[in-house]
């Protein structure tokens, strides 16, 4: 198969097309007075169009996946990349695509929208690929083969040998949709792009990455295929907010990897528990964050669960899925509730235990987690701060400055938050950058984890007395400000210069966008600064406190 397969398959009008050239494309420098795109000079940075080629984000993805940036095109969700494939390669009312049944519904819908014939071959009863049947359908007008692996809704990966037979035997593009690859043991086909010039791999941030809201889909393919799709892509299809949020998330894969292992462990626990229940006839294998469950009366079970506040997907009318519901793996509490509900099927309406349990569940249905992670890397410091406002005072602090560690430990201990702070700073120069940048990052995770601030107390105050008195007043009202009334006579406490103390709290106030009033008195300098940190932590504890389920904003202005 020649590298030119892309050019052979592309629609003639696309080959000839001279793509739209945006202002941001014709001049790509950063520092200039931009009077070329009819943008407003006000409202920075949102006044500017996003980078039409998402170079920074694509480079990050390229580094992560071990491909070149030129092998990647991004879409407003992978649904957009699917549509781009149709518009690049399939002539309406003439060409056709092939897929399998059952599978993800968008291939067929996208074919319909684009006026392209869609042919589907039913999978083998064990959900494996009917390779010969697929190959026998191919004609001169077949352009694309869509395979979803792990497949939605069956949850299985297709065997490598079958995939390789199709990649070698299919004279068109083979699109492998890997929306769920992060949950599978199968590994990604992205690494095989060099071997198969007709391979297109789709991935998304919507599932394992937990970012369905931002809409970011990725397609990986040969440079020739990507170049053609680039001609078709709307100029600014991925907005700036999405590009930034995606870049930030991709910079910290450890967080996501932890979530993936949690979901996989929960999946297996849920599957095993369901197998024990008499109403469950079969629990299917799963290489994704969902799986099929066969029950005797799927429609009834579906309605029964809806009445109890749990929505699963009824797939019982799909080929090979008779009797099946598709269940997405949730959090442990959600899964327990589901298990309890199914266990009690067919319970009566006034089932007391389930009702009590629902009251608990409905709490965390409206009460989102309050966690945040910040990774801040500059020439001077490399900082990672992670917080859970609703934690248990678990602290893991390593800033390289023993006394500062001790102070941050106080914040976690006395506020109740889980706090992890890892800093690699230029301490060989001095403590300034480490203290400043860490304090800003710490403030930022508070601001982010507070989210929309609904239901919080907002204000906090504390006055701990040992041999020192420290007063801290705190308002998470959105305005960064510090009033500092504490004097230190010694030059240093531990290895911390006392002249930096005010700066630490100022930086925190800026990061957290909070109002801080700090006053302290006392003879012992060590105790005095410790009392301030303790009082701050106590004030935080009070201010972040949230009424379970409350959703009012603690402000008469309706905005914080
Ligand atoms: C969920 C899903 C997607 C995701 O599409 P986005 O538009 O990226 O959210 C893609 N393919 C399959 C098979 C899916 O199940």
Image (cartoon, rainbow, N blue to C red):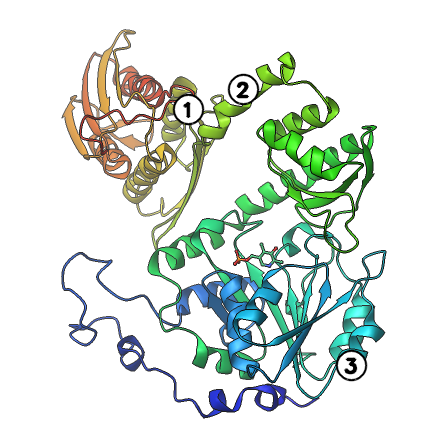
Q: How many marks?
A: 3
Q: CA distance from mark 1 to mark 2?
A: 27 Å
Quadrant where the image shows the C terminus = top left
Indicate the secondary structure of the residue bearing disc 1: helix
Please report whichever mark, 3 or 2, sits nearer to the chain's N-terminal start: 3
Examine the image and state in which quarter residue 497 appears.
top left
Disc nearest the viewer among 1 and 2: 2
Examine the image and state in which quarter residue 356 appears.
top right
Residue 530 location in percent, x, y? 31, 19
Disc nearest the viewer among 3 and 1: 3
Residue 221 location in percent, x, y? 58, 75
Residue 313 location in percent, x, y? 64, 44
Residue 71 appearing in the image: no
Q: Which mark is residue 360?
A: 2
- Residue in the foreground of this view, choosing between 187 and 534: 187
Q: Are marks 1 and 2 in contact (CB under 8 Å)?
A: no
Quadrant where the image shows the N terminus = bottom right
Examine the image and state in which quarter residue 225 appears.
bottom right
- Residue in the foreground of this view, choosing between 376 and 25: 25
Q: Which mark is residue 169?
A: 3
Residue 466 location in percent, x, y? 30, 7
Q: Which mark is residue 412?
A: 1
Where in the image, quadrant-wise, is ligand 1 located? bottom right
The residue at the point 47 percent across, 22 percent down is: 393
Residue 456 appearing in the image: yes
Indicate the secondary structure of the residue bearing disc 3: helix
Side (left or right) of 324 relative to 415? right
Side (left or right) of 291 relative to 446? right
- Residue in the foreground of this view, choosing between 85 and 431: 85
The residue at the point 33 percent across, 39 percent down is: 444
Q: Which mark is residue 319?
A: none
């Amino acid at each position: 198969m020649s590298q030119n397969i892309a050019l052979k398959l592309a629609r003639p009008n696309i080959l000839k097309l001279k793509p739209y050239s945006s202002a941001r494309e014709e001049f790509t420098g950063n520092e200039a007075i931009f009077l070329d795109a009819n943008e407003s000079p006000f409202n920075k940075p949102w006044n500017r169009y996003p980078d039409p080629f998402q170079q920074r984000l694509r480079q990050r993805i390229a580094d992560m996946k071990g491909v070149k940036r030129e092998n990647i095109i991004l879409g407003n969700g992978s649904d957009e990349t699917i549509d781009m494939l149709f518009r690049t390669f399939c002539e309406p009312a003439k060409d056709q695509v092939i897929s399998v049944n059952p599978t993800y519904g968008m291939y067929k819908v996208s074919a319909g929208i684009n006026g392209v014939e869609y042919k589907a071959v039913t999978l083998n009863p064990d959900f494996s690929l009917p390779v010969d049947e697929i190959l026998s359908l191919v004609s001169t007008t077949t352009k694309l083969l869509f395979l979803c692996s792990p497949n939605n809704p069956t949850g299985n990966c297709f065997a490598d040998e079958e995939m390789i037979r199709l990649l070698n035997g299919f004279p068109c593009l083979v699109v492998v949709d890997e929306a769920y690859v992060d949950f599978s043991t199968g590994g990604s086909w992205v690494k095989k792009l060099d071997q198969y010039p007709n391979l297109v791999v789709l991935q998304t941030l919507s599932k394992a990455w937990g970012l369905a809201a931002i809409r970011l889909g990725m397609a990986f393919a040969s440079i020739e295929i990507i170049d053609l799709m680039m001609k078709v892509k709307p100029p600014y299809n991925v907005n700036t907010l999405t590009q930034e949020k995606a870049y930030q998330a991709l910079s910290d894969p450890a967080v996501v990897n932890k979530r993936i292992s949690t979901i996989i462990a929960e999946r297996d626990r849920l599957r095993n528990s369901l197998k024990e229940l008499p109403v469950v006839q079969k629990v299917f294998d799963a290489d994704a964050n969902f799986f099929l469950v066969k029950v005797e009366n799927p429609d009834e079970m579906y309605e029964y669960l809806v009445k109890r506040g749990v929505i699963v997907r009824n797939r019982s009318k799909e080929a090979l899925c008779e009797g099946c519901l598709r269940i997405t793996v949730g959090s442990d509490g959600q899964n327990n509730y589901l298990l309890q509900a199914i266990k009690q099927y067919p319970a009566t309406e006034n089932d007391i235990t389930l009702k009590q349990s629902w009251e608990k569940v409905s709490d965390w249905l409206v009460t989102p987690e309050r966690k945040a992670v910040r990774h801040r890397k500059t020439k001077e410091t490399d900082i990672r701060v992670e917080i859970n406002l609703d934690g248990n005072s678990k602290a893991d602090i390593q800033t390289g400055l023993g006394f500062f560690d001790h102070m941050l430990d106080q914040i976690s201990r006395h506020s109740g938050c889980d706090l992890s702070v890892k800093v690699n700073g230029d301490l060989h120069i001095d403590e300034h950058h480490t203290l400043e940048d860490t304090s800003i990052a710490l403030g930022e995770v508070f601001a982010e984890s507070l989210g929309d601030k609904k239901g919080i107390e907002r204000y906090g105050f504390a006055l701990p007395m040992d041999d020192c008195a420290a007063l801290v007043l705190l308002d998470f009202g959105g305005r960064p400000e510090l009033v500092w009334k504490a004097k230190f006579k010694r030059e240093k406490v531990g290895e911390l210069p006392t002249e930096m103390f005010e700066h630490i709290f100022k930086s925190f106030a800026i990061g957290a966008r909070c109002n801080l009033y700090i006053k302290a008195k006392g003879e012992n300098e060590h105790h005095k600064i410790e009392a301030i940190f303790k009082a701050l932590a106590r004030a935080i504890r009070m201010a972040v406190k949230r009424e379970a389920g409350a959703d009012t904003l603690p402000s008469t202005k309706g905005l914080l």
